[in-house]
């Protein structure tokens, strides 16, 4: 059974004709995990009761910007 990294590498190589290094695959997987974690944090945060003037700082903190 091949690993997720091998499957991703095979898919990209077949789709683009570009050969990927282990480091490239690792960076893509790390970016995917970071995006998933950010999406989870965003969907877990209810913004419906947030005052409009505070909404910007809430979104910044979820995005890893300045603390609110």
Image (tube, grey):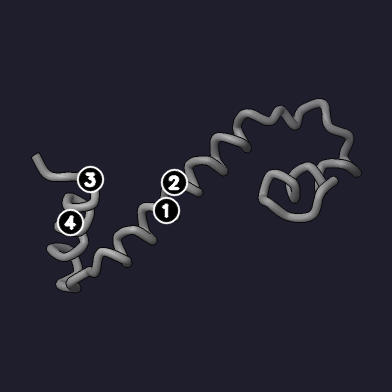
Q: Picture coordinates of residue 55 (x, y %)?
A: 82, 42
Callout 2 crowding tier (Cα within 10 Å): few <14, some 14–19, many ≥20: few
Left or right of 26, for residue 22: left
Instruction: Tell me the tag on residue 4.
Output: 3
- Tell me whether the residue at label 3 lies in contact with that at label 4, contact meaning CB atoms closer than 8 angstroms: no
From the image, tell me which residue sits under label 2: 33
The answer for how far apart the CA atoms under marks 3 and 2 are is: 13 Å
Q: CA distance from mark 3 to mark 4?
A: 10 Å
Q: Which mark is residue 63?
A: none
Q: Along the polypeptide, which appears first: circle 2 or circle 4?
A: 4
Which one is earlier in the sequence, the residue at label 3 or at label 4? 3
Residue lying at 48% horizontally and 42% vertically, measured from the top left: 36
Residue depicted at x 31% and y 66%: 23
Dots 3, 2 in contact, CB < 8 A: no
Disc 2 from disc 4: Cα separation:
18 Å
Residue corresponding to mark 4:
11
What distance separates the C-alpha of mark 1 from that of mark 2?
5 Å
Looking at the rendered structure, the secondary structure element under dot 3 is helix
Residue 4 against residue 48 in the figure, above or below: below
Number of callouts: 4
| Element marked by disc 2 | helix
Q: Which comes before the other along the chain, label 1 or label 4?
A: 4
Residue count near mark 3 (Cα–Cα under 10 Å), binned few <14, some 14–19, many ≥20 = few
Q: Which is nearer the N-term, disc 3 or disc 2?
A: 3
Task: Looking at the image, tell me whether mark 1 or mark 3 is earlier in sequence order.
Answer: 3
The residue identified by callout 1 is 30
Q: Are marks 1 and 2 in contact (CB under 8 Å)?
A: yes
In whole angstroms, how far apart are the C-alphas of marks 1 and 4?
A: 17 Å
């Amino acid at each position: 059974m091949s690993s997720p990294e091998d499957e991703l590498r095979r898919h990209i190589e077949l789709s683009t004709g570009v050969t990927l290094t282990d480091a490239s695959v690792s960076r893509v997987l790390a970016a995917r995990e970071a995006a998933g974690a950010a999406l989870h944090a965003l969907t877990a945060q209810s913004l419906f009761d947030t005052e409009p003037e505070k909404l910007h700082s809430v979104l910044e903190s979820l995005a890893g910007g300045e603390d609110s």
